[in-house]
Image: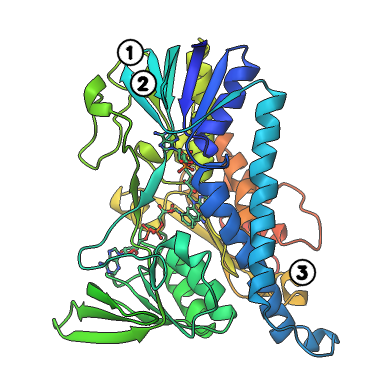
Amino acid sequence: MANYDVIIIGSGPGGYVCAIRCAQLGLKVACVEGRETLGGTCLNVGCIPSKALLHASHMLHEAEHNFAAMGLKGKSPSVDWKQMMAYKEKTIGQNTSGIEFLFKKNKVDWLKGWASIPEAGKVKVGDDVHETKNIIIASGSEPASLPGVEVDEKVVVTSTGALELGKVPKKLVVIGAGVIGLELGSVYARLGSEVTVVEFLDVVTPGMDAEIQKTFQRTLKKQGLTFVMGAAVQKTEAMKTKAKVTYKLRKDDSEHVIDADVVLVATGRKPYTEGLGLDTVGIKMTERGQIAVNGKWETNVPGIYAIGDVIEGPMLAHKAEDEGMAAAEQVAGKHGHVNYGVIPGVIYTHPEVANVGATEEELKEQGRDYKVGKFSFMGNGRAKANFAGDGFVKILADKDTDRILGAHIIGPAAGDLIHEICVAMEFGASAEDLAMTCHAHPTYSEAVREAALACGDGPIHM
Ligand code: FAD
Ligand code: NAI
């Protein structure tokens, strides 16, 4: 079989980006993928299909709620579910075939099938054993299971099943108020489902800035989602087309049952390493089932690296991509680097939620002296014109040095606005640096500048 410099296992955002960068750096590279199409969880059953449905359902929401006020009259559109699914599938296809094109362009061999590692320096795909100087594992993640909950991907579904339901359910129960639960919950709420979110904790999106959590939950409630907080799900019982969800309220241990047409289980994801034969090669794992790596993405076995969802850190496509590029550089003898302090997180609901760096709670815990600059989108002309005045930008900066330590945005285009702050943080900028940068008018970005001004002498439009 062919000899390679690098074989990458998995073609998700970690694997495919790593493969392309390895090729660009002059290495002979192959990428193994067992799915029918390239792109991993993200392109096939994750980021891309969910964003297509978020976009379509947001358009419907705009037509139903804001068109008339702008003088756009007429019958509001109704949902053609089959066509919406076709649009989603087409979007997936365009993206996955795009990766196939990039592989050909960069001379990356796609080895089709499921890989295992019989020993360091060898990758087995089907009956073929390929020799390689380096192996990079980018095998991603899968939904975590929940005791008492059996997924059939029809009535009790993970995100994968929720992205291809036969019809819009009348009643959807979502277990878990994390990113998947709230993104897909808001899709179905906009499409007309009665959505109830059952969450173990007392807050949504654990780990986020508390002020954002409160505003976000309030906003989603206004959009029609119902929340049952502090509730531990005990079990689900699926009938042919219906299900029951039993949960206990943590405050008084009382047991409750709710009916659903569909139950979405969104209680986290876990690393996927099945069939790789990691035991055989003696690869060390963490207590949480992740592949253990050092700062250069090397496992304990020389010549074997790991990146993306299968190692520690946030399970995000762009984190996997950055590790993919950096690991490629390491393998090519360069010095790949990822700044884990500046990885943005975005929730693509409407309004969007975005964050980077420390939360206010983390700064308090660290005992840091900090200041807060906040600005509401109500004071932003563009947002008001676009019926998007809900939400705010919050910048946290060091009290003495004014250096930006974190930022949290809920509002229009938050997922794009956050990058201005990411760049500023990469360059070690102060809030004043942002505040003194001219921002075009009228743009949502002005709200970021105003929040930066609020860290100093004060915003203008508040
Ligand atoms: P994956 O994308 O999981 O890819 C791993 C690939 O490896 C898979 O295709 C798998 O088939 C293949 N593989 C595994 N084992 C083998 C083997 N032995 N042989 C051959 N192939 C193998 N993140 C964001 O940043 N933004 C979002 O908007 C977002 N939305 C999401 C929405 C949903 C519904 C879900 C589920 C996830 C979402 N994520 C999002 C998370 C994102 O999808 C993951 O963080 C990202 O895909 C991780 O990339 P990866 O390369 O590590 O692994
Ligand atoms: P998550 O970790 O974001 O949220 C899981 C939620 O379930 C938590 O709020 C948790 O408290 C709750 N929970 C756990 N056990 C429970 C129980 N027994 N009963 C009730 N609630 C319970 O996980 P999620 O939403 O499944 O997403 C998985 C991963 O996918 C995340 O790590 C995320 O980073 C990634 N993702 C990213 C997206 C984005 O960047 N926009 C979109 C979708 C997924």
The residue nearer to you, when weighing 380 against 127, is 127
Across and down, in percent, residue 55 comes to 66, 66
Give amino acid for label 1: Pro
Q: Which numbered disc flags the more N-terminal residue, 3 or 1?
A: 1
Does residue 462 show up? no
CA separation in Å, label 1 and label 2: 7 Å
**Which residue position holds label 2?**
298
The picture places residue 68, in percent across and down from the top left corner, at 79, 89
The amino acid type of the residue labelled 2 equals Glu
User: Any mark on residue 397, and which?
Assistant: none
Q: Mark 2: few, some, or many residues within 10 Å (few <14, many ≥20)?
A: many
Query: From the image, which quarter does the C terminus lie in?
Result: bottom right
Q: Secondary structure at mark 2?
A: loop
Determine whether label 3 and label 2 are within 8 Å by CB: no
Per the image, the residue denoted by label 1 is 302
**Comes first in the chain, label 3 or label 2:** 2
Q: Residue at x 23, y 35 (%)?
A: 286
What's the residue at 75%, 74% (across, down)? 386
Residue in the foreground of this view, choosing between 211 and 413: 413
Ligand 2 in which quarter: bottom left
Residue 382's label in the rendered image is 3
Q: CA distance from mark 3 to mark 2?
A: 48 Å
What kind of residue is marked 3?
A: Arg
